[in-house]
Amino acid sequence: MKRDISAFFKNQNFVLLLILLVLNIFFSIMSEHFFQLNNYFNMLKQSSALLITASAATILMMTANFDLSTGSNLAFSGVLYAQLASSGLPLTLAAAITLAAGTCFGIVNGILVAKYDISPFIATLGMLFVGKGLALVVCNGQSVRSNLPDHFSAMMSESFIGIPVPIVMAIVGVAIFWILANKSLLGKYAMVIGSNKNAAFLSGINVNAICIWLFIIVAALASLSGMMTASRIGAGDPRINEFFFMDVIVAIMLGGTSLTGGKGTIIGTLIAALIVIVIGNGLSMLNVLIFWQSVIKGVILIVAVTFNEKILIGDIGSKMSGLENGSPNYSPATGN
């Protein structure tokens, strides 16, 4: 029995699935419109950008790095894409230019962090403000809605074998990054770098190149997410998804990826992202103000960090091991 309890706490994916199930049951009881196929499709369509970006950012965090500029990159890319499309450029060319511009966020972040050893917090926070400013500059602070081509929103409204295209893109994206994290050298190297950067360097791994490329991949997908979002809503909005980076970080850390690197799972991130999505959708159906939703997500982030860094890895594992081994040093009264 004690061994089963220990295994339960150590299997974080199982705990997350249980939480997801409980949330679905709760919101289904509280709102008659929640447990409907159309609602689940809408949730996944609206959050496809989160699923794609968080999957890529998980591998980045495995190296003990992270990117706070994903939200501003998303907003900037969405506005630039809409602006270029409204100027008469073909959508393919507009998308290529936007993707190149958004990828520059990753190039700058990667060089600052890997080459100049600047803290990822400082480097990506700086790019967050740069991106927010550029998004407003590109459109003069106004949403881009006029003169957009009729097919601007076509891709995001299409379906593939009955499944909305954004959901298909999210499934493919998550699958690709699961393979990269678990079956490729990139994932293995990311784990090694996060566990011991110096040892990775001494073993011949090109630490700087891998970190830079991971920043570039995350930035490119944040840019793609911006174009997907602009296409979905039919406009380029410089203020949309201002807390997108927070959803990404919450999903990654709640999913079991360590902020200090060397540990992470794409499946955990996927389940945690679904939890974030369900909470946002459920609270909206219950008419909870968006401000309170931000408060709740902040609390979830704190709990996720505590659970992941302190409890799951350390305290629970050691205490359960003590119980299983009959350790005389463990006191039920004090927990020590």
Image (cartoon, grey):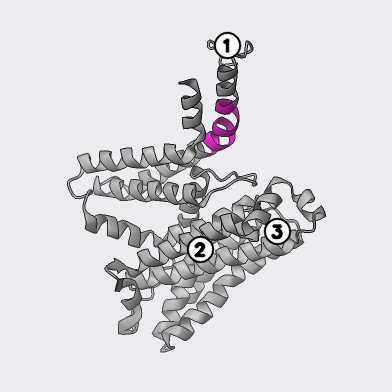
Q: Are marks 2 and 1 in contact (CB under 8 Å)?
A: no
Q: Quadrant of the C terminus?
A: top right
Q: Which residue is mark 2?
A: 176
The residue shown at (56%, 16%) is: 335
Whether residue 140 is visible to the viewer of this picture, yes or no, is no
Residue type, mark 2 in image: Ile
Q: Earlier in the sequence, mark 2 or mark 1?
A: 2
Residue type, mark 1 in image: Ser
Dot 2 falls on a residue whose secondary structure is helix
Q: Which residue is mark 3?
A: 113
Counting other residues with Cα less than 10 Å from the Cα at mark 1, is it few (<14), some (14-19), or many (20 or more)?
Answer: few
Q: Earlier in the sequence, mark 2 or mark 3?
A: 3
Q: Which residue is nearer to you in this view: 129 or 117?
A: 117
Q: Confirm whether the magenta stretch covers residue 314.
A: yes
Dot 3 falls on a residue whose secondary structure is helix
By secondary structure, the bulk of the magenta-drawn segment is best described as: helix
Instruction: State which region is magenta.
Output: 305-317
Q: Is residue 246 above or below residue 140?
A: above
Res. 31 image quadrant = top left
Q: Which residue is nearer to you in this view: 42 or 72?
A: 42
Q: Quadrant of the N terminus?
A: top left
